Image (tube, helix red, strand yellow):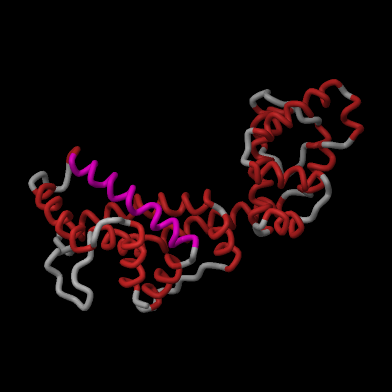
């Protein structure tokens, strides 16, 4: 199935109106917006409508891997490599938060090139004569999103790699959380207070993060936690690292107290000063 056909089938399934009617409506709207140079309040409303229609379609395409597949094909045709690791593919399939992060960044990047190419330069035309005729503006816009997805994905993947490196630099994250809950600390009034505040802090995080931390404290391995939560070990490590960072941030601002024995060289220096 071609890239265009995949996109149009996804759009047709998501939008209730007939494609020919959508193209007619798009043509009228483009002529109205042209009078204002594709700028101003009316154009902002148009952009918001375009993003609102496109977002659920792109979410689905990221989840089922279509967006990555179409991006890879489009760039490989131009001898530009693009690869989504199996670990990242599984994460994007299972994590709405990560999908939304990629989709929002892709939309924002695509809006710029879409305005220039489709509207100002007139590359979108309701009179296009191809095997499948013209596309509606939403299909054309998602085509632009395919071009932008490579850059957005690579930036996102680099951030995940950096988190993994920071995680590896910690002395022993699992030991950190097990020590945190050790009975010896409960003998001190400050530790009792800390235990209560820790529960409050943890309650402010997503349910999956709470499960990761509690299972880590109970001694489960990353692979066991990932299996239980139907995710992958990389996502488990990311959630644990982010909570640990939030923990040190809370200590820095005086919300919680961390015993000196729990400070590690892997903790942010600023957070260590605040917790001391």
Residue at 73%, 27% (x, y): give it.
197
Residue 250, compared with residue 209, is above or below; it is above
Residue at 31%, 64% (x, y): give it.
143
Q: Looking at the image, how many numbered discs can be counted on the residues?
A: 0
Residue 56 covered by magenta stretch: yes
Residue 127, compared with residue 171, is above or below; it is below
Residue farthest left in this picture: 35
Position of 76 with respect to 261 (left or right) is left
Location of the N terminus (image quadrant) = bottom left
Position of 183 with respect to 39 (left or right) is right
Q: Position of residue 33 (x, y in %)?
A: 13, 47
Q: Nearer the viewer, residue 145 or 51?
A: 51
Q: Nearer the viewer, residue 27 or 172?
A: 27
Residue 204 covered by magenta stretch: no
Residue at 72%, 55% (x, y): give it.
228
Position of 236 with respect to 89 (left or right) is right
Q: Nearer the viewer, residue 49 or 84?
A: 49
Residue at 46%, 71% (x, y): give it.
82
- Residue 89 in which image quadrant: bottom right
Location of the C terminus (image quadrant) = top right
Q: Position of residue 177 (x, y in %)?
A: 79, 42
Position of 48 with respect to 55 (left or right) is left
For the stretch drawn in magenta, the main secondary structure is helix
Task: Read off the magenta span.
Answer: 42-63
Q: Position of residue 208 (x, y in %)?
A: 65, 46
Residue 187, compared with residue 99, is above or below; it is above
Q: Position of residue 231 (x, y in %)?
A: 65, 57
- Residue 139 in which image quadrant: bottom left
């Amino acid at each position: 199935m071609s890239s265009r056909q995949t996109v149009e089938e996804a759009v047709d399934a998501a939008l209730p109106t007939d494609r020919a009617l959508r193209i007619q409506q798009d043509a009228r709207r483009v002529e109205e917006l042209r009078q204002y140079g594709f700028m101003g309040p009316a154009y902002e409303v148009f952009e918001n409508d375009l993003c609102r229609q496109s977002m659920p379609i792109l979410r689905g395409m990221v989840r089922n891997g279509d967006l990555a597949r179409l991006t890879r094909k489009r760039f490989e045709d131009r001898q530009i490599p693009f690869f989504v690791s199996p670990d990242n593919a599984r994460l994007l399939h299972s994590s709405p938060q990560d999908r939304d992060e990629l989709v929002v960044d892709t939309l924002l990047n695509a809006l710029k090139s879409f305005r220039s190419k489709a509207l100002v330069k007139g590359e979108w035309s309701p009179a296009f004569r191809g095997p499948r005729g013209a596309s509606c503006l939403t299909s054309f816009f998602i085509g632009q999103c395919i071009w932008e997805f490579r850059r957005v994905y690579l930036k996102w993947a680099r951030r995940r790699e950096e988190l993994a490196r920071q995680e590896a630099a910690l002395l022993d994250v699992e030991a950190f959380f097990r020590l945190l809950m050790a009975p010896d600390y409960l003998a001190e009034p400050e530790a009792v207070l800390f235990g209560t505040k820790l529960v409050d802090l943890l309650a402010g995080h997503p349910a999956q993060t709470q499960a990761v931390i509690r299972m880590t404290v109970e001694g489960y391995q990353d692979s066991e936690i990932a299996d239980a939560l139907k995710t992958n070990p990389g996502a488990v490590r990311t959630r644990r690292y982010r909570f640990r960072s939030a923990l040190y941030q809370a200590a820095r601002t005086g919300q919680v107290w961390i015993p000196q024995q729990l400070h590690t060289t892997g903790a942010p220096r600023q957070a260590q000063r605040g917790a001391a």
